[in-house]
Amino acid sequence: MNMITPLAPSLERWPDEGKTDHRWVEERRRHAPGLDALLRWAHSLGASRIDFKTGHLVTIKVHGVIRPATLQPTDSLVMAEIVGHIYAADGMAMLGIGHDLDTAYSVALNRRENLRFRINITPITVGRGNGAHVVMRPIPARPPSLDDQRVEAEIRATNALRSGMVLFGGSTGSGKTTLQGGLLVDKLMNPTTYSDIATGEEPIEFLFDDLRPPNGSKISQTEMRPPHMTFARFTRGLMRREMTDGVVGECREGETMEAAINLAMTGGKLSTTIHADSPALMVVRAIALCPRAERDNLVSALGQVLRFCINQRLVPRKGGGRVAIREFLTFDRDLRRKMARTEPTDWQDLIQDAVEVQGQTFGQAITRLLEADLITEDTALLEQKRDS
């Protein structure tokens, strides 16, 4: 549960509020001295969330405690300036017609370091009409290494795949993007292979532009900006770019799923995320996303292009923090042949049985963490009950 502190002494709030040289936004898209200064200050306190809401004080969350960061509320004009700066000039107009907006924002900490934030902007209703809610969460400069994430050998082996589809699943906040990012860094920095990777993300969380792979491998990252740049349009464009790997931030609707399957059919490798609670349910959700008019053909193709499914959850780590448990399955040739001979309505049971026989279940992952003394017996029991 989040705790809310009473109003703190002024020295505990942002000290530059109201200074003439710290306007929230001085020049849209280019210069926001007040916003940037507040973000640096929040970072210095270890804030995990910065919250702007029309007509309210700015708040920050530090070590699970929510506290006010300003003395004055942010009015509608200030919010319009902030949204226009961190997203685009048409940001408020997009909110006005019901869109929520995802983006990222970068602030220079010093000459060598940047702070990056993941941002969600949502239209809300306030006392005077329409307003905006902006939530900013810091993004680490780099994902933890595969060793630090305790990534299994079977998952690491997906970096060697040259074609097909790899699905990452889990709930929001389960670390899917962090796992994907760790795999990308590992592949880019591998001195024995060459990779040309393109990602489409909403927003870009880990920015790899400053990586210098030893063998000339490259990564190009594109931020999705609907309606002009969408996941579906990005995925279709990959077919003309001859990339070794395509990464789609999320398959969330039929047009993107259709484009992703078609790309994998042509011989490319595509990785994407799906929100579902197990590998079997990930495939069920992928089927449901296929457009109805082409569903039979696309589902048949999906069964042949799948190469790997992984589902991840984060559980409390003994001593603090969190650690991942993963359920995964390799879709080898024999399994794909079984899927071709099985009605798609029965794939869920087929895949779940395959996970238990030739993959890794959450139960097995829990047992390994217990043996490594990384989780408590109580945590293990709670997670085991979840799937019982």
Image (cartoon, grey):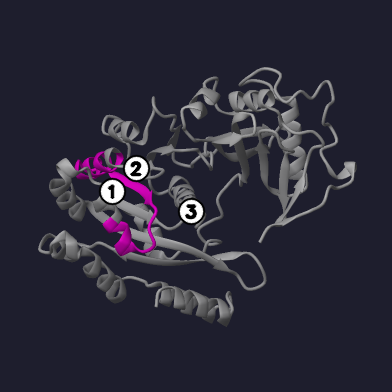
The span shown in magenta is 256-284
Residue at point 35%, 44% (across, down): 252
Mark 1 or mark 2, earlier in chain:
1
Residue that numbered label 2 is attached to: 245
Numbered label tally? 3
Residue extending farthest top: 27
**Which residue in the rendered view is the most extreme toward the left?**
341
Q: Is residue 45 above or below residue 277?
A: above
Left or right of 165 on screen, residue 316: right
State the SS at label 3: loop
Where's residue 376, x and y in %? 59, 79
Residue 254 lies in the magenta-colored region: no
Q: Secondary structure at mark 1?
A: loop
Magenta segment includes 278: yes
Q: Is residue 297 above or below residue 200?
A: below
Amino acid type, residue under disc 3 in the picture:
Thr
Quadrant of the snapshot with the N terminus: bottom right
